[in-house]
Image (cartoon, rainbow, N blue to C red):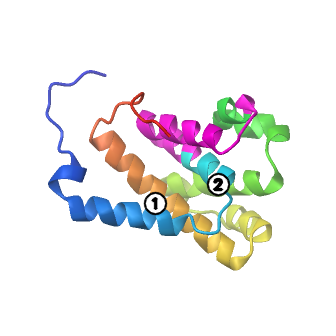
C-alpha cells in the first residue's frame, strides 16, 4: 500500500504518550515467558494487519532463542498445527484472538476458562495486560503506516 498522506509520528509529536506506552509494554510483560510473550504479540499483530509489529516480534522471537521457524510461520493456522505449541501457548493464543477480536464474540467463557486453567491468577492478569498492550501498539503501527524491515533486535 502506497500513500502520499503524511502520517503523524506519535513518538515525536506526543513523546510523553509514547514513553508511557513503552513503560506499559515493559510492565505488561513482567513474569511472562519471553517466547510466549512474542508468540502472543505476533498473533495479535497478524490479526490486526500490522506488518511492522509482526516483523519486529518475529525477529525478537528468533533473538530469544526460537529455533523452530515453523512455530512462527504456522502461527496464523496454529489450530491446525497444534503439535508445535504447548497447551499453555495454545490457551494464550486462543485468548489473544478473543481479546483482539473482542467486537466479534467478546471473550467467551470457554476461552477464558481454558486460559484460567493454564495460568495462575497473576500470570493470567499479566497475559491479559500484554494482549491489551500489543493491540494498542498495532494500532499505532497501522495508523502510522510503519513499514517493516527497519527493526533490528
Q: Which residue is mark 1?
A: 133
Image position, residue 82 (x, y; %):
81, 40
Who's the residue at 70% across and 42% down the image?
65
Q: Nearer the viewer, residue 105 or 32?
A: 32
Who's the residue at 53% across and 47% down the image?
44
Report the magenta stretch's main SS: helix
Magenta span contains residue 104? no
Q: Which residue is mark 2?
A: 34
Image: 47 above or below 117: above
Which residue sits furthest bottom?
121
- Whether residue 93 is visible here, answered yes or no, is no
Q: Give me the C-alpha separation between circle 1 and circle 2.
A: 15 Å
Label 2, secondary structure: give it.
Answer: helix
Quadrant for the N terminus in the image: top left
Q: Earlier in the sequence, mark 1 or mark 2?
A: 2
Who's the residue at 61% across and 54% down the image?
37
Label 1, secondary structure: give it.
Answer: helix
State which quadrant residue 63 falls in. Answer: top right
Q: Which residues are magenta?
A: 42-70
Task: Say left or right for 133 vs 113.
Answer: left
Who's the residue at 18% across and 39% down the image?
7
Dot 1 alpha-carbon crowd within 10 angstroms: few under 14, some 14 to 19, many 20 or more: many
Image position, residue 6 (x, y; %):
14, 34
Dot 2 alpha-carbon crowd within 10 angstroms: few under 14, some 14 to 19, many 20 or more: some
State which quadrant residue 43 falls in. Answer: top right
Q: Nearer the viewer, mark 1 or mark 2?
A: 2
Task: Say left or right for 87 vs 30.
Answer: right
On residue 90, which mark appears?
A: none
Amino acid at each position: 500500500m502506497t500513500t502520499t498522506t503524511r502520517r503523524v509520528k506519535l513518538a515525536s509529536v506526543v513523546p510523553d504518550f509514547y514513553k508511557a506506552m513503552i513503560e506499559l509494554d515493559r510492565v505488561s510483560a513482567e513474569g511472562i515467558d519471553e517466547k510466549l510473550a512474542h508468540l502472543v504479540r505476533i498473533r495479535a499483530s497478524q490479526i490486526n494487519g500490522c506488518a511492522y509489529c509482526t516483523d519486529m516480534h518475529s525477529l525478537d522471537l528468533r533473538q530469544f532463542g526460537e529455533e523452530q521457524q515453523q512455530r512462527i510461520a504456522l502461527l496464523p493456522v496454529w489450530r491446525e498445527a497444534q503439535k508445535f505449541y504447548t497447551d499453555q501457548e495454545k490457551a494464550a493464543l486462543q485468548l489473544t484472538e478473543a481479546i483482539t477480536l473482542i467486537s466479534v464474540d467478546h471473550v467467551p467463557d470457554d476461552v477464558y476458562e481454558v486460559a484460567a486453567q493454564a495460568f495462575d491468577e497473576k500470570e493470567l492478569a499479566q497475559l491479559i495486560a500484554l494482549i491489551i498492550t500489543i493491540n494498542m501498539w498495532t494500532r499505532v503501527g497501522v495508523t502510522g503506516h510503519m513499514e517493516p524491515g527497519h527493526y533490528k533486535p
